[in-house]
Image: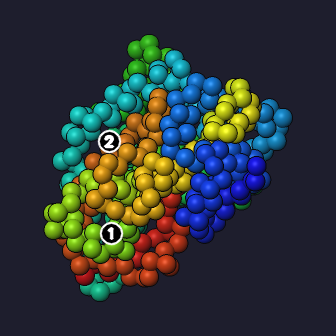
Amino acid sequence: MTRITLDPFVTDLDGESARLRAAGPLAEVELPGGVHCYAVTHHAEARQLLTDSRLVKDINVWGAWQRGEIPMDWPLIGLANPGRSMLTVDGADHRRLRTLVAQALTVKRVERLRAGIEALTTASLDRLAALPKGEKVDLKAEFAYPLPMNVISELMGVDSADHPRLKELFEKFFSTQTPPEEVPQMMADLTALFTKIVDAKRENPGDDLTSALIAASEDGDHLTDEEIVNTLQLIIAAGHETTISLVVNAVAALQTHPEQRKQVLNGEVPWENVIEETLRWNTPTSHVLIRFATQDIEVGEKVLPKGEALIVSFGALGRDEAQHGPTAGDFDITRSPNRHIAFGHGPHVCPGAALSRLEAGVALPALYERFPDLELAVPAAELRNKPIVTQNDLYDLPVELG
C-alpha cells in the first residue's frame, strides 16, 4: 500500500483529497511529524466504520502510543489525546458525557437562539457598513469569526474578554506549524484558561451550559473536573471553528460561481442548499483524528490492522463519485439528493450540527442582503489555506463590499 504524506502546509487540499480517494477506501497516510496511520476516504466505508464498535477512541489501544513512538511535543497531540471528554471515550461513558451537551443542542432548543444570532449578525453587518467605502475587508476576521465565537461563548458562559487569548491559543492548537517546544506550554495554558472559566462558573453559576455541567456533576452525574474542563474546551473549539469555515467556504464558492449566486439571491434556490452543498463540496473539516482498531477490520479489499490509528478524511469522501455521482467534483446548489456526512455519522456525530447550520443560515442571507454587490478582492487562486490538517480554513477572505 502506497503511503500518502499529508501536506503540513495544505497547499493543495483538493489534489490531496483526490489522491486519497484514488488510493481506495482505506489509504495509508503519514501525518505531519512523521506519524503513521490510515485514512478512510470513501463515503460508504466511512459510514460503516463510524458505527463499528471495533474502532474506539481510547488512545491506549494505539500500538504506536504504547511503544512510546508518539512524542508529547507532537504538534497534533492535542487532537490525538485531548484529555478525557466525550471525544475520547466510548459506550456508557460517552453517553454520560454527551447527554447534557446533546440535550442543550437539539434542533428545537437551538432554534430558540435564532433571535440572538440575528441580533449579533446585524451588529456585525453594521460594523462592516461603517467601514470606509472602497476599503478591502477581511470578511473572515470581521464577520465569519466574531459571530460563532460570540454565539458559542454565550451558550457556554465564556466572557468576551477571554476571546483574544482563546484565539491565540487555538491558532497554536490546530496548526501543524507550532514549534514542538511550545506544544506542552500551549496545552497547559489552554487547560489553565478553561479551568479558570469553570472555577468562575462554580462560584457564580448562570444560565449557560458550563454551569449546567457543573450542576449535573454535583447532582450525581459524576462528571469530574477534568471532564468538565475538557468538555468546555471541546465545545468552544469545535463550536466556532467549523462555523467560521462553513461561512467562509460558502462565500468563496458563491463568488466563484456567479450563476449559482444569482440563483440563490433571486430566491430560485434556498440558502439551505448552499449550506449543504458547501458542507459536502468544501467541507469545514478536512480530516478528523483519531480512532483505534481493537482488532483487524476489513475495509474493502484491505485490512485496518489491530492497534493502528484511523482518521476520517471528510475532504476526500465528500467528493466520492460512488456516493454523489459523476459530478461529485462540481459545486452545485441544485444537487438532489445531497446525502453527505460532513458532521460525522453514528454515536459520535457532531452535537453542534444544528447550531452551525442555523448560524450559517442566518449569516449568509443577511450578508448578501446587506451587500449584494460583494466581490472577492483577490483572485480565487490567491486564497490560501492555513496549515491545519484537520480544519479546511483560509488565512483570510479579502472582499470589497460594494
Residue 306 visible here? yes
- Residue 76: where, in percent of width, then height? 66, 49
Marks 1/2: CA distance?
Answer: 22 Å
Disc 1 designates what residue? 254
Q: Residue at x 43, y 38 (%)?
A: 350
Answer above or below: position of 32 versus 93: below
Considering depth in this image, is 10 or 133 the residue closer to the camera? 10
**For residue 353, which quarter of the picture?**
top left
- Residue 90: where, in percent of width, then height? 56, 24
Is there CB contact under 8 Å for labels 1 and 2?
A: no
Q: Residues within 10 Å of mark 2 (few under 14, many from 20)?
A: some
Numbered mark located on residue 88 in the image: none
Taking 228 as reference, is 77 left or right? Answer: right
Disc 2 designates what residue? 354
Secondary structure at numbered mark 2: helix
Taking 9 as reference, is 358 left or right? Answer: left
Amino acid bearing label 2: Ala
Q: Earlier in the sequence, mark 1 or mark 2?
A: 1
Considering depth in this image, is 361 or 336 the residue closer to the camera? 336
- Residue 184: where, in percent of width, then height? 70, 47
Residue located farthest toward the bottom when viewing the structure as drawn: 134
